[in-house]
Amino acid sequence: MKTLFFRLQHRYAPYIFVAPFVILFLTFTLYPLVKSILLSFYITNGPQSQVFVGLANFRFLWTDPAFHKAVWNTCLYAFCSVFLQLPASLGLAMLLNSALVRGRNFFRFAFFSPHLVGQVFVAVLFSVIFIPKFGLLNRVLHFLFEVPVDIKWLGNPNLVMPAMVLTSLWMYVGFNMIYFLAALQAVDRELYEASMVDGAGPFRQFLHITLPGIRSVAVFVIVLSTIGSFQLFELPYVMLNNTAGPDDAGLTVVMYLYQNGFVSGDLGYASAIGWSLAFGVLLISLIQMRLSGTWKTED
Amino acid sequence: MINRFEDYFPFGKAPILILIITLLAGIFLAFNPVEKNTASLRLWTFARNHAVPYQKATPAFEAKHPGVRLDVQLVHGEAVTSRLRAAFWADLDVPDLVEVEISRAGSFFRGPVDQVGFIDLIPFLRASGMDDRIVKARLAPYTNRGRIFGLPHDVHPVMLAYRRDLFEEAGIDVESLESWEDFIREGQRLTRPGERYMIELSDNNPGHFEMFLFQRNGGYFDANGELIMDDEIALETLKFFIPLVAGPRRIGSDLGSGRVFTQAIETGYFLSFICPDWRSKLVETDIPRMAGKMALMPLPAVMPGGRRTSTWGGTMLGITSACADPEMAWEVAMHMYFDKEQLAERFRETNILPPFKDAWELPAFREPRSYWSNQSLGKLYAELAEQVPPQYTSPLIETAKTKMGGVISSCAAYYREHGEEGFDAFSRARLKEAGDEIRQYIRRNPY
Amino acid sequence: MLRKAPWQKILLYALLSWCSVLVLIPMVWLIAAVLKGPDDLFHYLFFAPLQRFSLYNCRQLFTQIPYLRFMINSFFVAGCTVMVQLFFSSLGGFALAKYSFRGKKPIMVLMLGTMMIPAQVLLAPMYELIYRMGLVDSYLGLIVPGAVNVFGMFLFRQSMLDLPDDLLQAGRIDGCTELRLYWNIVLPVSRPMIGAFCLIAFMGSWNNFLWPQIVLHTQGRFTLPIGLNQMVGLYAQDYGAMMAGTFLAVLPVVILFFLLQKEFISGLTAGAVKG
């Protein structure tokens, strides 16, 4: 029976279904978005004291040494994330892919479990692991490699970022491995068999079968990883006890945003930083996707 | 049965589990709601050893002022700042009284002076006559553009704490260490890098360096808010300080805090360390095994007859401009900070010298302390209190400190590589570079 | 690789085991730390001898901060968030997968865009908005802004694309409203994806730090990350208790993952591998 109600609800159902998303988006994303764009043209110090400065915030960003340091730290971290973490994840995935099924679930769980721990908790845990002299890392390193015991990971400006990279390597290697594992399993085994008949060694197999086979997933993971690492904040923030570390060694762009917005109170400048970050991330993601030649059109 | 339920709730087993947990949690929370805040006044502090005495003192205050309820909340340091900021921004839920740490206080003085989130305390100070009875130098860090925005909690004079037994063993006569030259001489005699250092000094934490800077009347900013962190005094201090922590004739090193430090003191890895009054209590608690073996001496002077102390750290109490009853808030401040009866007990518990000169006469401040070889800790610190140098502040104080940390770090690295050669030029340039960066930020400030 | 010489298999297992040991060491250390007595934390590298096992750290944890309260708060907020997000995201994903309607393309572009914007940019204006709505320092203030999970919508869309259209048409012919289609047909079929989503959403809310830090003011409403961070600031030297706190905070998510492992992994990779 095609009642009016039935026809109407059939027609408008999709709109109603996406309505929650749209409403929340307009309220909690679009409105703050627009507001923060406006804010970035001001220097503020509270609701009554806003000074319009036009593009001065952005111009200052160009010469701001602290911002440069933050960008440098963040880029270094993102670079290491992509070029250290992802090969490690891929390697683990390949190992796991070829192993017998029996152990696989266990290994998968083992490698993935660090990701379950949120950034805050990882930071708390590792801040204790990194303690000089008594912490786990130094003692193990000393035991294995005779490294001096009082290396100050979080107190030495040159070691802060490496400590962060190490920690996030631990956190994310399993997460990315899952993606790679699924992608590897989707690669047709017959291709490998055929290539072995042709006399191809493992290296050639890797280059010509594996890599192209996981290509779209790899791009997805790379882009996701990059975006995520540019937003690094909680890990260094909590690990360095709510500071940026010695000589701002742990300062990331988002941390600088937070400091300016919520510690100094200049939300205008913070918004300018945020927008610069968004713009930069967008640019890099587009470049990455372009370079890998995957610009899919959906629907 | 679960399957029947699944017909009604088609999302699956996991959501069912989550739903059950949520309901249980919700029921618990419904029966244990957060207590409504019926306090007439709220005070936020960030330090446990402040909050506990205040909470203890609250009943006495409420007895004196019937009908007034005071709520003292312990809020983690960073959260105080971010919450105050967020509260100021959205103009809501601001507490009446807030304790702010000295290096953070400056950042609240941004913006037009009329819109600083704290009220000017000068009228209160004058009316109560307190302005003469507080150590003047301690008002400086909380003064901005002619208004005083915070009451100082402390004086924090600095002495050197040392292992009396080890000093005696080494044949050092503490009385003779009157100037830094004397101290360094003994230090170079006794220091064996990697095994033993004369004093704990950090080569990248600006806190230690600042102590020397302030002792010489230097600082980050002057009374007018001008940047002086790269002036001649700072340069002299830098050139004096770096050889102490880097290079072949160094006498100081640094391991970190907590357990590492405890062990270092116990084993004599550090023979002495910088000890403001608050640190002395931490030491008593964390390093109990050294009881009776530690003692305090005034800082060696820079020049004969010079200042024998400096300062490190501090806290202010401010009354926020959102407070509905500033007079009552002032009463709270008076009660918590300047009530002689409590100050005695508080000193015993925290070793922190209040900036309130009248209190120093109390017997509690004159008691000998067995931990410190029966020295009268209060008397020693009080004697130095008037000499404590003033620190001036600015909204950029934290940035300045960070930059200074970077300067110290890179100068130490340079000194290790090249020694004295070209060091003067390098440190001068590096310091100037840091100063110019801060000036860049100052110029940007439209207020 | 099907045929492998035995030595290759051994090497493989050795490598994998070695790697997983490396990865698991911090967790093992954490568990050990929870069970060590007051002075033993750094004395023994991992586990203390059995007779020195002690729950001292846990006791310290629960007496020094209202940890149980934090935990219950976290459960409540995370649970509500998951429920709400599940409903809205699956509904939205369904619409995007199985309907064509005006505005579909712009909506998808919007979704993509929001995922790239660092949330911190929106923090202050959002806070002001929440204040105007009177939701500051409340549980709703945490749940409402995050009620739709865009990533989740993508996931659901991806998995629902595969749903056979004839099934839905048959339902319509039978007189089902769209909502009933969703409720009775789509949802039961999407259970694996729902399982995956539950874990993702729960993790996200459970570990969320920055927004609750700004929104919540009274300690009685704090969630675990904020509570633990506060502990780091105030009780910095009490490593044992901090470790106990970290361990107990991680446990619920680990348990949930254990239960939902398969769904989670298939759901997570569905979007990437197929797309």
Image (cartoon, rainbow, N blue to C red):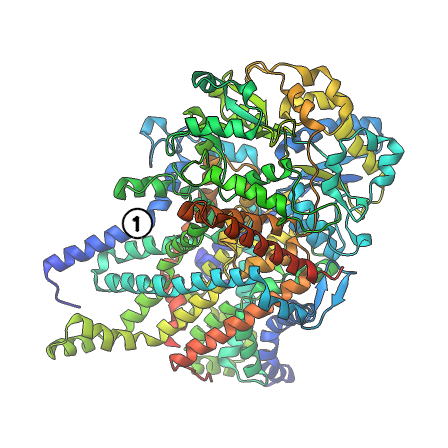
In the image: residue B330, left or right of residue A85: right
In the image: residue B123, left or right of residue B139: right
Q: Residue at x 59, y 62 (%)?
A: C120
Would you place residue B249 above or below residue A38 in this image?
A: above
Dividing the picture into quarters, in which one does residue C40 lie? top left
Image coordinates for residue B212, horizontal then vertical, percent: 59, 37
The answer to which of A41 and A195 lies nearer the viewer is: A41
User: Can the viewer see residue C182 in this picture?
Assistant: no
Q: Which residue is mark 1?
A: C22
**Which quarter of the figure is the N terminus of chain C placed in?**
bottom left
Image coordinates for residue B202, horizontal then vertical, percent: 49, 39
The answer to which of B56 and C135 lies nearer the viewer is: B56
Q: Residue at x 38, y 60 (%)?
A: A175
Image coordinates for residue C132, horizontal then vertical, percent: 74, 60
User: Can the viewer see residue A118 in this picture?
Assistant: yes
- Residue type indicated by callout 1: Leu
- Mark 1 neighbour class, 10 Å CA radius: few under 14, some 14 to 19, many 20 or more: few
